[in-house]
Amino acid sequence: KGSLQPCSCSRAMAPANGRSNGTGSNAALLPTSIVEKVFAACCLAFWFSVSFLGIYTLVVRYHLDTGLSLGWRKLHDTSSGCLLLVVSCNGVFSELRSTFGELKEIGFCSSIAEEVLKLVFFWATAGFISEGPWSERDSGMENDGIRTFGHVVCVCGLVFGAIHPGMGCSRRRLRTHELDRQQARLEEQRRAVLEEPLDRSEPE
């Protein structure tokens, strides 16, 4: 009796300076940063290029061999094209979820493990498309333009894969900075709205 109880509203108050610390439930409210969006656009372009190579493999193979017979070469090229399509769809889904999804409290080690898996995923895909039916002289699908395109996409995949671990470990800091930037912009707009009537009331 007579003891002081802590006010329940004090536990729900935001930090005094209006900044989010990016931990707990606040992490789910952090907006996606511009750097993440630009990097995601580059990665999506890579995965769409991979899907194009998969479609090219399927279309050209069936154009060259329209029969119902299923030889080893046709089986290999068909499986390669389907594999590239599945891998690209998985990459697009993973990239969109990582960029626009909520940050989860899964621990630092788990985050590192996830980013290392993405690194291997990017590099394995890039190595797979470095050569293909479009670069084999005896496959009937040789195309110098597609070969060069595959080499460019391969290099991009290696670069994006190397950047991905650093980007993944920096998402919380980038989103916290983006939240602070948006709050500062909203504060400037609020001040401009409050000062506008005063400017109009000044004598000419």
Image (tube, rainbow, N blue to C red):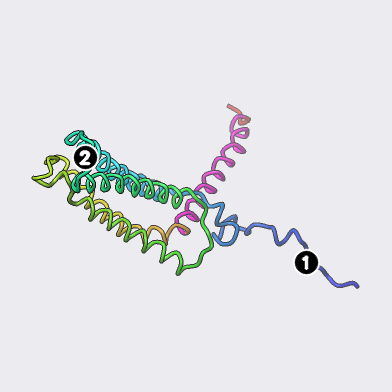
Residue shown at the point (30%, 54%) measured from the top left: 160
Q: Mark number for residue 135?
A: none
Closer to the eye: label 1 or 2: 2
Left or right side of 70 for 168: right
Residue behind mark 1:
6
Q: In the rendering, at what x and y percent does residue 20 appear?
A: 56, 57
The prevailing secondary structure element of the residues shown in magenta is: helix
Left or right side of 80 for 202: right
Q: Nearer the viewer, residue 199 or 101?
A: 101
Residue shown at the point (23%, 53%) measured from the top left: 128
Left or right side of 200 for 36: left
Taking the magenta stretch, the answer to whether it contains residue 180 is: yes
Q: So how many labels did they put on this image?
A: 2
Q: Which residues are magenta?
A: 173-200
Q: Secondary structure at mark 2?
A: loop
Q: Mark number for residue 69?
A: 2
Decide: few, some or many residues near mark 1? Use Cα within 10 Å; few <14, some 14-19, many ≥20: few
Q: Quadrant of the C terminus?
A: top right
Q: Relative to residue 172, is residue 145 depicted above or below?
A: above
Q: In the rendering, at what x and y percent does residue 179 appear?
A: 52, 51
Query: Which comes before the other along the chain, label 1 or label 2?
Result: 1
Q: Which of the 4 quarters of the picture holds residue 192?
A: top right
Q: Which of the 4 quarters of the picture holds residue 161?
A: bottom left
Q: Which of the 4 quarters of the picture holds residue 69?
A: top left
Q: In the rendering, at what x and y percent does residue 116 appear?
A: 36, 64
Residue shown at the point (25%, 39%) measured from the top left: 58
Residue shown at the point (33%, 57%) measured from the top left: 121
The furthest residue to the top: 204
Q: Amino acid at mark 2?
A: Ser
Q: Secondary structure at mark 1?
A: loop
Left or right side of 162 for 177: right
